[in-house]
Image: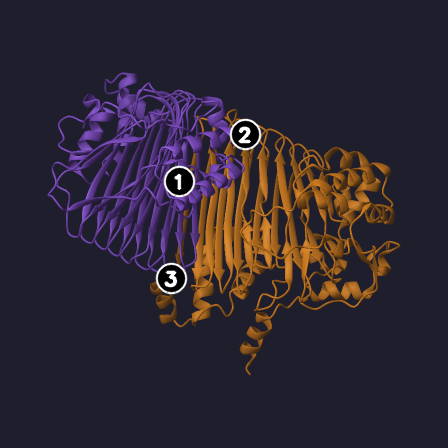
Chain colours: A orange, B purple
Amino acid sequence: MDNRQKEINNLKDYKYGFSTDIENIQAPKGLNEDVIKFISNIKKEPAWMLEFRLKAFERFKVLKEPDWQKPKFPKIDYQDLYYYSAPKSMKDKPKSLDELDPKLLETYKKLGIPLQEQARLNGIAVDAVFDSVSVATTFKDELTKQGIIFCPISEAIQNHPELVKKYLGSVIPTSDHFFATLNSAVFTDGSFVYIPEGVRCPMELSTYFRINASNTGQFERTLIIADKGSYVSYLEGCTAPMRDENQLHAANVELVALDDAEIKYSTVQNWYPGDQDGKGGIYNFVTKRGLCKGKNSKISWTQVETGSAITWKYPSCILKGDNSVGEFYSIAITNNHQKADTGTKMIHLGKNTKSKIISKGISAGSSDMTYRGLVDISSKAKNSTNYTQCDSLLMGNKCGAHTVPYIKNKNSESNIAHEATTSKISEEQLHYCQQRGLNPEEAVGLIVNGFCKEVLQQLPMEFAVEAQKLVGISLEGSVG
Amino acid sequence: MKEQLQKDFYNSIKNLSLSQKDIEIKKFCLDNFIDKGFPNKKEEDWKFSDLNQIIKNNIGELSFYNDQASTNKVDTSVFVDGLEHNKIVFINGRIEKIDFEYEKKGQIEIIDQSETINEFENSNSLSDLNNAFTNKCFKILVKKGYQLAKPLIIYHTTNSKIWSKNINLRLNFELDKDSSLRLIDLFNDASEKNFLNIFYNFELKENAVLKNYKVDKFENKNIKYSFNNIDQDKNSISETFILSSGSNFSKNEINCNLNGVYASAFVNGVFSLNKEKHHEIRSIINHLTENTKSYQLIKSVLDESSKAVYQGKIFVNSDAQKTDGYQLSKAILLNKESEFNAKPELEIYADDVKCSHGSASGSLNEDSIFYLMSRGLSYQQSRELLINGFLLDVVEKITDSEIKNLIKNMLGIKE
């Protein structure tokens, strides 16, 4: 076998599918008040935090699992999950990376996330979340100098309670939908970012999520606050080991942008998608919502969704401040038996608000993809505009691509434009590329990358290169 | 409502000579309806128009029994002038007249199908209501190769005798091979606060051509629901045009199954609303086999506190390669209070297809008004010119020139 073939074979398999053999502390199986108290206790949380969780749990008890989504899945037994799992070595937090369990360092090295500070050249501050806890945050000192807070949310609850108290649950309240409420009750860790007034964050902030333990749900919570006139770009990456059973990932992400602030949130989601027969894989049921609270604020979501057995999420923007801007750029790729139901919500409340949605869906194999979105211009949102474009590409006749946009215009001074197309890669394009010496797979890769270019351009440099490769890998084996 | 329904049901079957089995079936439909009630906004298809609430607010208590023993006088003044046509006249839901005077004898057959019930895919509890309470249903069969010389106009007339009533009516059409039919539904209401529930079923055989124009133009305070089911065989064409304007509330649903190759469906609609009217068009085009085509164009002009909803779905089965599906909805909101909601939906399981949709809504273009005013038109004139031009686009899609002119006259659009 020549090297090239080897490389392709390597790429074909899910290369993050290994698991780390590490001792864990777990909460007792199941979901009840005791488990919530256990989580709160082990994290040494103040009383108000426990109250927040219990309030959410009370609400959760009366909620029913929604069933309007396109991809159906077998009923999840919420009592059969572990809601907390952490490497034992993390019980007493290591003070520096040198004290970190070498096995963890090794894991992140394998994932290509160097935690050691040698990675300085990389210029990205990383917060690494392993199952239920954050294991390391890099570049802390440099950020602190500018007054930026970038730390695990459990630490923020201890050290910056006034900020967490003020903003946690302000965008996704404890009374929200089923999965968001579940998260509010049992969330374990995640990142907290605060950018002070007028500061432009000098580097990309990044969180890397890793599910390792089996039978665990990962419930992380991210809260990003951009104070007046600040700017931050935040990246998120995810992987999980290959396991036969489905694992649940129900995160909540809240963004708050005050006057003139801008938050750019990019995700490259590459959870384990299950094998070729659709066995195993992650259920990625995430609630992401941004609030443009202040005037002239801007929130931009960019997502590349290639992993997960089922992706079910709608990163949304609530455009409350006048002149605020919401953007959503998405590439979703499904192959084999993957299913995705994703899109966005743009809720225009303030005057002169603008939103833009670019969504590219590619489905191959026996997969199924749905774009579902809402554009709602309220009667007070004078002079608002929305532009939506969702394109789908189908490869093979066993897959499906669907578009379900909801468009509500209650304002005569506002404009909404929406367009959607569905097509396949034309024979002419393929022929043209092959004629110039590309093999069919390379040709498809090239065309697909062109199809996605509008979105890929929005990603930060390092991510864009990675994402481009990922797009190619995800479609491996779907041609011919 | 349950007692009322049951009481009215027994009153209405009392006068009919139905077999025990037929009564059982009707009873079953009634129970289904009692179980589900009027559709409400919890149902996805009624998300934007909560019929249950609308009936409650506009009518209050509905009664379902219509005394159809005595005939109503046909008021000939409602007939369309200047266009020779065949007639079916419904007055208060009772068939008063079926007249195919311009057609050759023996080419059109009218079959009594009162004992059958209709079951449709993508339907709702209103079909149960309709099945339980319609007591006359005819099938109009256009025989093989026959093309009607003149259009057929169905007059839906209500007079002031009825109030707070539910009227159910049903018609079936079969267009045999190579036949064609032009059909206009014309609504004339002299009544208030009634709920009309209309179901049509069309069966189009090979090469058949159906052109259906639904015209609800005259101001009235009734609530209307209409469901068209169209099954299309090879090479058949269906064209549906909806002018949605007069009633307080109206919802038109089109469910079109393209079963045969090269079948095509066209759905065009105009909403021209004012006051507090609330109208909806919902279309479902099912591309079930190869090489089928659909085209939809919906335009709305919304004034005062009116509200228009368009829900359009293109479904493409995995066998339906080479499908061509297109859908466009545009709306102009003239007033702060008006509202336009759209849900253009694509559900696609085949890869070699060309499907797209677009939706746009916004205000009247001020630049265009300025352009016209700078050429001497008044503000009002420019506005009218722009709106007429906007709507004319849809009216021009009507393929039958006689009927196109009729509808243009009704809308007051001159070229």
Label 1 vs 3, first from the N-terminus: 1
Q: Is residue B50 something one can see in this rendering?
A: no
Q: Is residue B381 something one can see in this rendering?
A: yes
Q: Chain of mark 2?
A: A
Q: Chain of mark 3?
A: B
Left or right of A261? Residue A409 is: left
| Label 1 crowd bin: few (<14), some (14–19), many (20+), radius 10 Å | many
| Label 3 crowd bin: few (<14), some (14–19), many (20+), radius 10 Å | some
Under mark 2, the amino acid is Asn
Q: Nearer the viewer, mark 1 or mark 3?
A: 1
Q: Which residue is mark 1?
A: B131
The Cα–Cα distance between marks 3 and 2, rounded to whole angstroms, is 47 Å
Q: Residue A477's x, y, as percent?
A: 50, 70
Under mark 3, the amino acid is Asp
Q: Chain of mark 1?
A: B
Judge whether A316 appears above or below B332 on screen. below
Under mark 1, the amino acid is Asn
Q: Which residue is mark 3?
A: B319
Q: Residue B223's x, y, as percent?
A: 39, 27
Q: Residue A458's x, y, as percent?
A: 54, 49
Viewer-proximal residue, A212 or B60? B60
Q: Give the quadrant of the C terminus of chain B.
A: top left
The Cα–Cα distance between marks 1 and 3, rounded to whole angstroms, is 33 Å
Viewer-proximal residue, A108 or A43? A43
Left or right of B414? Residue A262 is: right
The Cα–Cα distance between marks 2 and 1, rounded to whole angstroms, is 53 Å
Q: Residue at x 61, y 65 (%)?
A: A274
Q: Which residue is mark 2?
A: A323
| Label 2 crowd bin: few (<14), some (14–19), many (20+), radius 10 Å | many
Q: Residue at x 49, y 54 (%)?
A: A361
Q: Nearer the viewer, mark 2 or mark 1?
A: 1
